[in-house]
């Protein structure tokens, strides 16, 4: 099998599945609820068993080119601003070399990191993080990475790729959002492929306009350069599952700045290099953070720690206050939804008590969440639009048959979100794997603050 899963890894995964089932039984008090969950649990265990069944040995990730293997994780772009970025790889090499520049034919800027320069360990190697500075807003940066052993032999590499620096204030831009990839790796790969196809389609559109002499700021289509994942990257935290996630998303994450949202399957262990903070180079010192890109303000919440974290609630309100001093879209992202027509509806009501008053007080424009394995958008609730997007590869399920009064649309499909920002206005589109738009909404950003 292509996964090369060891017995220890398989056993660990299987025990994790059974543990989840056991914990879930504790929540139900009647036999009907328990019976429904048993059915779902059997499907979960079957997913774990599929690792040993060659019939489920589905292809995922790009094939290696040539004789030089790719890095276990990465490259992925982190902490992107107008002038600097971090490029990360997980490598077994003794030295990793980076060549980069704004001219594809002349990657004249070079850096190298030794093992001693990479203090964060992974399960198999180390995380090498390259901080590059002094760049210009909106500039396209080309780069190439190579890993060498202690004898100077090339053992890992990634071909030339490119990403774009954050735009200046007021410039138009677009970004992509995905939620809940989990364990259907073929569907996860198809969602990533659809994002790449969309980028290629837009690029071709702009090239055709340029060739015809019709390309202008008003006719140019926006290529998404920013990528958010709303959590549940996989179903059990292990280096094996993280490596598989990065293999599937590698060709997206090597080209788009990546900002993750912590979720229920993202705890990990620091000593194994599988914890959220060990893998990701996100702003700040916590698993929640704020980020500004162009004229849009993003606040990312760790919904797994909201139950008891007064510190995080204070952070959230502080960031909402700061965001309210500037114009532009104000968007909050988290894993657990406040409003849902699915199985998490009751959990959302608990979060509503803490978060909804803050969102309405500071006039948040949009709240994005994952977890539920379908798409759902609310009507404005207290002026705030809530969207659940969980079609990134996890097994789909449908929302309840009885539609919630607050729900504008619900749809069960693998998908991703495309959001285009132009000044104080932004357009949200939900696209399936065939790039068909099944929902679209234009939001005019309000004046924020109490």
Image: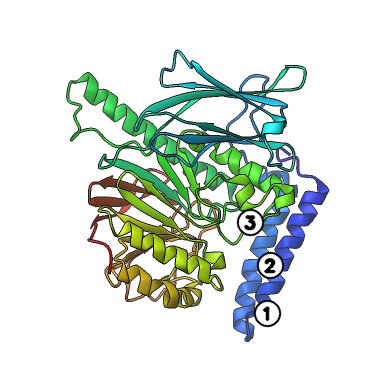
From the viewer's perspective, is residue 391 above or below residue 402? Answer: above
From the viewer's perspective, is residue 300 above or below residue 222? Answer: below
Residue 26's disc number = 1
Disc 1, SS: loop
From the viewer's perspective, is residue 440 above or below residue 258? Answer: below
The quarter in which the N terminus is drawn is top right
Examine the image and state in which quarter residue 83 appears.
Answer: top left
From the viewer's perspective, is residue 134 above or below residue 336? Answer: above
Q: Is residue 195 left or right of residue 279?
A: left
- Pointer 2 with pointer 3, Cβ within 8 A: no
Residue 156 or residue 29, whichever sits in front: 156
Residue 352 or residue 438, whichever sits in front: 352
- Upstream in the sequence, badge 3 or badge 1? 1
Q: Position of residue 188 (x, y in %)?
A: 53, 46
Residue 317 or residue 351, whichever sits in front: 317
- Upstream in the sequence, badge 2 or badge 3? 2
Kindly identify the residue that appears in the image at 41 percent across and 29 percent down. 135
Q: Is residue 59 left or right of residue 201?
A: right
Disc 2, SS: helix
Residue 172 or residue 26, whichever sits in front: 172
Residue 20's disc number = 2
- Cα separation between marks 3 and 1: 20 Å
* Residue found at the far bottom of this picture: 30
Question: Counting other residues with Cα less than 10 Å from the Cα at mark 3, is it few (<14), some (14-19), or many (20 or more)?
Answer: many
Kindly identify the residue that appears in the image at 62 percent across and 86 percent down. 30
Q: Position of residue 319 (x, y in %)?
A: 39, 60
Residue 411 appears in view: no
Disc 3, SS: loop
Q: Which residue is mark 3?
A: 235
- Pointer 1 with pointer 2, Cβ within 8 A: no
């Amino acid at each position: 099998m292509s996964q090369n899963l060891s017995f220890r890894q398989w056993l660990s995964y299987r025990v994790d599945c059974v543990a989840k089932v056991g914990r879930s039984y504790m929540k139900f008090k009647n036999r009907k609820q328990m019976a429904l969950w048993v059915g779902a649990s059997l499907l979960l265990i079957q997913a774990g068993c599929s690792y040993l069944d060659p019939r489920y040995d589905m292809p995922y990730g790009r094939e290696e080119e040539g004789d030089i293997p790719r890095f276990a994780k990465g490259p992925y772009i982190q902490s992107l601003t107008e002038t600097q970025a971090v490029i990360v790889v997980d490598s077994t090499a003794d030295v990793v070399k980076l060549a980069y520049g704004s001219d594809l034919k002349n990657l004249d800027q070079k850096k190298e990191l030794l093992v001693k320069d990479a203090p964060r360990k992974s399960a198999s190697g180390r995380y090498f993080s390259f901080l590059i500075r002094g760049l210009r807003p909106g500039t396209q940066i080309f780069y190439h990475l190579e890993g060498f052993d202690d004898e100077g032999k090339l053992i890992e590499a990634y071909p030339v790729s490119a990403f774009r620096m954050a735009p200046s204030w007021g410039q138009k831009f677009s970004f992509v959002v995905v939620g809940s990839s989990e364990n259907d790796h073929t569907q996860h790969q198809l969602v990533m492929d659809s994002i790449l196809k969309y980028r290629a389609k837009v690029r071709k559109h702009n090239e055709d306009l340029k060739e015809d002499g019709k390309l202008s700021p008003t006719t140019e289509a926006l290529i998404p350069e920013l990528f958010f994942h709303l959590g549940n990257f996989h179903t059990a935290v292990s280096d094996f599952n993280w490596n598989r996630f990065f293999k599937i998303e590698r060709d997206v994450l090597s080209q788009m700045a990546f900002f993750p949202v912590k979720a229920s399957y993202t705890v990990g262990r620091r000593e194994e290099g599988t914890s959220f903070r060990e893998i990701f180079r996100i702003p700040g010192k916590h698993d929640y953070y704020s980020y500004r890109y162009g004229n849009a303000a993003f606040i990312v919440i760790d919904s797994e720690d909201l139950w008891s974290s007064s510190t995080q609630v204070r952070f959230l309100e502080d960031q909402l206050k700061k965001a309210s001093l500037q114009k532009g879209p104000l968007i909050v992202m988290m894993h657990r939804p406040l409003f849902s027509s699915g199985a998490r509806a009751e959990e959302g009501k608990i979060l509503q008590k803490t978060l909804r008053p803050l969102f309405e007080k500071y006039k948040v424009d949009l709240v994005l969440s994952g977890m539920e394995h379908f798409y759902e958008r609310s009507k404005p609730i207290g002026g705030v639009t809530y969207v659940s997007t969980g079609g990134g590869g996890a097994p789909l399920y449908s929302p309840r048959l009885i539609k919630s009064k607050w729900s504008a649309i619900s749809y069960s499909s693998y998908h991703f979100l495309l959001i285009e920002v132009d000044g104080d206005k932004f357009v949200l589109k939900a696209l399936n794997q065939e790039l068909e738009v099944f929902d679209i909404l234009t939001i005019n950003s309000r004046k924020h603050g109490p």
